[in-house]
Structures are given as structure tokens and as C-alpha cells.
Image (cartoon, rainbow, N blue to C red):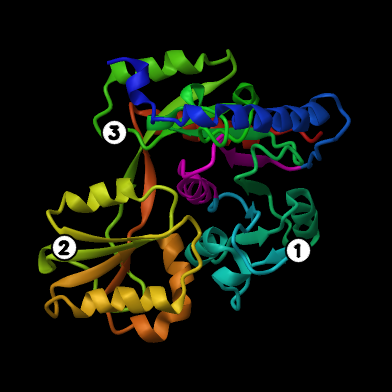
Amino acid sequence: MSFKNLIKKKNKLLLPVSWLYLTGVRFFNFLYDSGLKQSTSFSLPVICIGNLSVGGTGKSPMVEYLVRLLKDQYKIAVVSRGYGRKTKGVLVADRNSTAAHLGDEPMQFHQKFPAVTVAVGERRAEAMQTILPDQKPEVIILDDAFQHRAVKAGFNILLTEFTNIFTGDYYLPAGQLRDLRSNYTRAQCIVVTKCPERLTQDAAHLATRSIQLKEQQALFYATLAYDPPVPVFGGTELHFDSVKTLLLVTGIANPLPLQTELEKHGKAIVPFYFDDHYDFQEPDIDRILQAFKGLPAGTAAMITTEKDSTRLQQFKEQLQHFPVYALPVRHRFLFGGMEKFNILIADFIKKFEKP
């Protein structure tokens, strides 16, 4: 196996446009590296989760992993841009919040961890400064902020997908890179996500050599693990043996891992794939329901992701009488990496020194 076999195909015809994009990215980073623009530091532990590329590398499951790890010891706040929301400015999630207010992923965090402060804002530094006086968090988790640099986090977790590791990717639009490859050196921790369940040490070694870790960096490998489906609009739990067909409805960057997981159960998959963070419309729901009605009663169920389910809530009246389920996903560390990862996070917080 060569490392090139691990890399997704790219469009080399678009490389000239990528060079123009790269010029802009270099200038943006130059402003911060030269001190012409300043990053804001905070006097509490800030953990940033991000990537160098567009598309899904598993940032939301990593946010949730950290929340579960820390919420019983510290008062946690999660700060996100709130991509796809229909509001502006800084908002803190409350009982009246919806995906339209917060964005789908922050709404997902709020639903799963109602005791945790979830805030959104186009400018993360402003959002953090807004919540500090009232919410008084002890640890802040920054969602998808690695490339922005407006906030100087104390601990950066960089995610990269196993089948598209940043070292072999091209810049937009020829590839998926949105930030400088060299910025990986700012991360204290790199996690290669969406690995095969049975990843071999040899395959992992190829990726490790490609990344060329710095002395102070730690590298981990993780695969996606799926929990049992959860009813979206109430009802009984789903037993895969009781249905023959699954309508897979997603608005995520890459639905194929989810499809592969469901195909393990030997079911027929009817895909309804939409763009990432897609704003579902009435005709979309009508089309899905028509597919339901075309199948024998009791033989089909609809499966979606947790973040998609937050955007489907507005269609509860139409969907609540159908079997609709969300499939939770989480990271599972490989090669015994979970304990070491947890210790790194705990040590960072305990040894944090105010700037």
C-alpha cells in the first residue's frame, strides 16, 4: 500500500485558481504572523477544535467528546459561529432556541447538553467576551475556529480525515484545503478521523510519516462509532430486524460512511442526499413522504443524522406519524489512544497559566 492510495482524487485542472486562493490565504496568515493583526487571549483554558479543510472531519463528535469528558468537573461553554443560522450577532442558547436561531450543530449541542452554555457569533472573540460576565465558564470549547486566528486558544486539536489527510490535499477549489498546510504546526494535538475500524499499524505508520510531527505534538487515530438510533419525534426504539428499507435523509458533507454503516445491517437504502447544512423545504419533505407511502406499511424507517434532525423539527406536524430516527455518532480512539488523549486535555486545564 502506498500513501497515495489513501488520498481522494483531486481536480488538477483547477490548480491555477487554487494558486490565487492560496495567495489570499497566505496574506491572511501574514497579517497575524507579522503582528499587524492581533489574536485575543483569554484568562481561562480555551480548547479549539478545527481542521485545515472544508467538509466533515468529525468536529461535532469531538466537541461532544470533550463536553462529556469535562462537564462533571468544570463549567463548560461551547462557542461556535452558528453556520447556516438565520440570525446575526451573539446569541446564547435557551429553551426557545431552534436550529434557525443557532445553526444545526450548536442546536444539537444544546439539545444533548442543556446544562452547558452554548453560544454563537460570527466573531468568536466577541461571543466569548459576551458570555464571560454572566455565564462564568471555567473552560471554553471553540468549535471550528482553528483557521480564523482571532482567538488564541491554549490548546488546539486539529482533525484530518484518514482518506484525505491534509498533507496530500490541494487548496480550494482543486482540493479541499482552506488553510495553509504549514499551520498544522500550531496544533498541540492531531487526530486522524474516520479511520477504518481495523486500521493496521502499517497503514497508520504511512500517515504518521506523511504528517511529520513536531516534537511537542501528539497524534491519534480514531474511527466513527454509531450508537443505537434515537426517535426524533417520540415513539419506540428502532430494531433493524423489523424493517427492510431505510430512507437515509442527510444534509452533511459526506454521507457515505453513514450509508456504509447502515448497509452492514443488510437493508435496502433509499438515499435523499442534500448539501451540507441544507435548509429543508416543504417539497423535500413531500418527496420523502411519497417514498414512504410507496413502500409496504411497517417495512421502512427514515434515518437521519442528529444535526439534520434539528432542521427537520420544523416539519414535526408532517413527520411525527412516521418512524423517523437520528443515528448518534462518536469518535472511538484506536491503538489505546483514549487514555493518553484524556490525560493531555486534563493536564492542559490543570496546568493552565493566565496570560
Q: CA–CA distance between discs 2 and 1?
A: 43 Å
Res 53 label: none
Q: Residue at x 35, y 80 (%)?
A: 319
Q: Is residue 67 above or below residue 206?
A: below
Location of the N terminus by quadrant is: top left
Label 3 sits on residue? 196
Label 1 sits on residue? 89
Q: Residue furthest right?
A: 36
Residue 102 lies in quadrant: bottom right
Query: Label 1: few (<14), some or many (≥20) within 10 Å?
Result: few
Residue type, numbered disc 2: Phe
Location of the C terminus by quadrant is: top right
Q: What x and y, as percent, mark residue 159?
A: 50, 35
Residue 22 lies in quadrant: top right
Label 2 sits on residue? 240
The number of callouts visible is 3
User: Considering the numbered disc 3 on the image, is that residue within a helix, a strand or a loop?
Assistant: loop
Q: Nearer the viewer, residue 223 or 161?
A: 161
Q: What x and y, as percent, mark residue 147?
A: 66, 37
Q: Residue at x 72, y 27 (%)?
A: 26
